Image (spheres, rainbow, N blue to C red):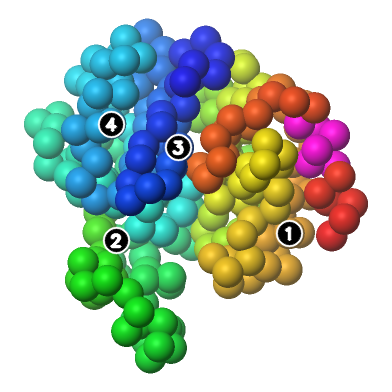
Amino acid sequence: MKVAKNVEMIELNIQGFQINPTLIWDEEKAILVDTGMPGQVKALQTAFENAGVPFGKLKAVILTHQDIDHIGSLPEILQECDWKIDVYAHKEDKPYIEGEKHMIKADPNRLSKEAWESLPEPMKALYLNPPKANVDYVLEDGQVLPECGGIEVIFTPGHTPGHISLYLQESKTLITGDAMVIGNGTLQGPVPRNTPDMETALKSLERFLDYDIKSVICYHGGFTNENVNEQIEKIVKSI
């Protein structure tokens, strides 16, 4: 789905639900924000083609955070490409992405016995051996990457310790990762059951009030451009 000039929301389907990485590009390079679940490289390549962007133009991946459905296809992307792909993430999530620490929400030791036993066998295998990849560059709050009209990093912890959102300055598009979701056509805060530090996650939403936002891409729920600044303000005021 085309969101703005050179901004495409990718729609991936996995086991009956949709997730939404974002493709951004300029004349020099393409940047992928989040990578879907393991095994979705071909679907990502097709999405690039549909957007009219050669997959060979991909030069960087920005990870909003460490969760499996965001970093899942990254190892396969790096293996598939015979050119350098720079990987960006926040320092707080870097050790989890690189496998130095076990991914927080995929750690069997953090699950109850009942929750673990309820998981399908393929998911258990994924939890025991989650995807991992090296992070080349650590992102900081307020940092602006000059590519693609300016990509500003907004540190929005809570969903994970190193969760970030991105503000595309040229199109005034906010990429929320899992800091917000869209449900029933409206913006909502993070999903409590998937957010270990809900208090911090809700506090992080106040950061969005500092921006003039034209449209929002949520990894879960998709796209909206309906009075987004007012919607965000309403969420924050309800906290």
Q: Is residue 99 magenta?
A: no
Q: To which residue does mark 3 refer? A: 20
Q: Tag 4 or tag 2, which sits nearer the N-term? A: 4
Tell me, yes or no, whether the two marked residues, 2 and 1, touch with CB atoms within 8 Å: no
Tell me, yes or no, whether the two marked residues, 1 and 3, touch with CB atoms within 8 Å: no
Element carrying mark 4:
helix
Tag shown at residue 98: 2
Q: Is residue 18 left or right of residue 44?
A: right
Tag in front: 2 or 4:
4
**Measured Cα–Cα span from mark 2 to mark 4:** 22 Å
Q: To which residue does mark 4 refer? A: 44
**Measured Cα–Cα span from mark 2 to mark 3:** 23 Å
Tag in front: 2 or 3:
3
The crowd level at tag 1 (other Cα within 10 Å; few <14, some 14-19, many 20+) is many
Q: Tag 1 or tag 2, which sits nearer the N-term? A: 2
Tag in front: 2 or 1:
1
Q: Residue at x 33, y 32 (%)?
A: 60
Q: To which residue does mark 1 refer? A: 202
Q: Tag 4 or tag 1, which sits nearer the N-term? A: 4
- The overriding secondary structure of the stretch rendered in magenta is helix
Q: Residue at x 64, y 56 (%)?
A: 190
